[in-house]
Image (cartoon, rainbow, N blue to C red):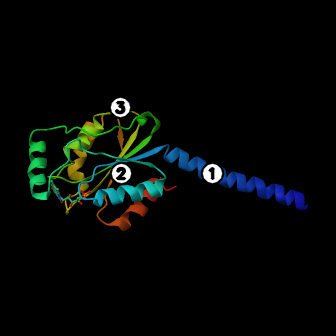
Amino acid sequence: MKTMFLLCAAIFAAAFCGFGFSSRAEASGKILVAYFSYQGHTANVAKEIAAQTGGDLFEIVPVTPYPAYDECLDVAKAEKNNNARPSIDGRVDNMADYDVVFVGYPIWWYDAPMIVLSFLESYDFSGKTVIPFATSGGSPLSDSLDSVRASAAGATIGDGILANDAGDVAPWISGLGYAK
Ligand SMILES: Cc1cc2nc3c(=O)[nH]c(=O)nc-3n(C[C@H](O)[C@H](O)[C@H](O)COP(=O)(O)O)c2cc1C
C-alpha cells in the first residue's frame, strides 16, 4: 500500500513538473535580452528582464560613443533625420540559437534610436519573436513600433512595454509566459 502511494506520488510529481517545463518551453524557447542604453535606465530594465526570464544579455554598444547630453540630442536628431544606421561594436554570434529576443532602448526623438534599427537589420529574425521594451521621459512605446516592425523583418512582434515603472516588469513578464 505504502509502495503504491509512493508510486502515485512520484507519477503525480513527474506529471506536475513536466507540465511546468513544457508550458514554459512552448511559451519561450531560448531568450536573448538585447538593449541599448545611454544613461543606464534601459540597462537596468534589461538586467531585470534577463534575471526574471533566465535570458542572456547583449548590450548594443555604439562604435562611436554618444557625446554628453546636450550634444547627444543634436547627434541623435541628425541620425534620425538622415535615417542613419550607426555601427555597433560587437555582434551576437549565436543569434540562430534564440527564439525570443527582447529589444530595449530609450525613446529618442519620439522613436527608437537609429542604432537599434542597425541592430535589428543585422540579423535574420524570421521565425523569431521580437519583444520591444523602452524607457522614456514620457513618450509612449507605440511611437517606436513602426520602426521596430520595419527593421525586424520576418519577426513576430510581441506585446512590448514602456518600462518607466520598474514594478510593471514582473507582471508583464509573467503575463507573456516567460517567467522562469
Ligand atoms: C537624444 C535623446 C532624445 C530623447 N528623446 C525623448 C523623447 O522623444 N521622448 C521622451 O519621452 N524622452 C526622450 N528622451 C529621454 C529618454 O528617453 C529617457 O531619459 C530614457 O529613460 C533614457 O534611457 P537610458 O538611461 O537607457 O538612456 C531623450 C533622451 C535623449 C538623450
Q: Is residue 145 above or below residue 82?
A: below
- Write the residue at 10% across / 39% down: 82
Q: Quadrant of residue 73?
A: bottom left
On whether ligand 1 comes within 8 Å of the CB at mark 1, the answer is: no
Question: Which sits earlier in the primary sequence, circle 2 or circle 3?
Answer: 3
Cα gap from disc 1 to disc 2, whole angstroms: 24 Å
Label 3 Cα crowd, 10 Å radius (few <14 / some 14-19 / many 20+): some
Q: Which residue is mark 3?
A: 124
**In the rendered image, which quarter contains the N terminus?**
bottom right
In this picture, is 149 found above or below 159? above
Secondary structure of the residue carrying numbered label 3: loop
What residue does disc 2 label? Answer: 159
Kind of residue at badge 1: Phe
Q: Circle 1 is placed at which residue position?
A: 19
Q: Earlier in the sequence, mark 3 or mark 1?
A: 1
x and y, in percent, of residue 55 in the image: 46, 49
Please tell me whether mark 2 or mark 3 is closer to you in this view.
3
The kind of residue on which mark 3 rests is Asp
Residue 138, x across and y down, in percent: 20, 63
Give the residue drawn at x 47%, y 54%.
53
Residue 49 against residue 27 in the figure, above or below: below
Q: Position of residue 21 (x, y in %)?
A: 60, 50
Which of 103 and 161 lies nearest the eye of the viewer? 103
Taking the image as shown, residue 18 lies to the left or right of residue 46, namely right
Labels 2 & 3 near each other (Cβ < 8 A)? no
Answer whether residue 147 is visible to the viewer in this image. Answer: no
Q: Earlier along the polypeptide chain: callout 1 or callout 2?
A: 1
- Dot 2 crowding, Cα within 10 Å, few <14, some 14–19, many 20+: few
Secondary structure at badge 1 equals: helix
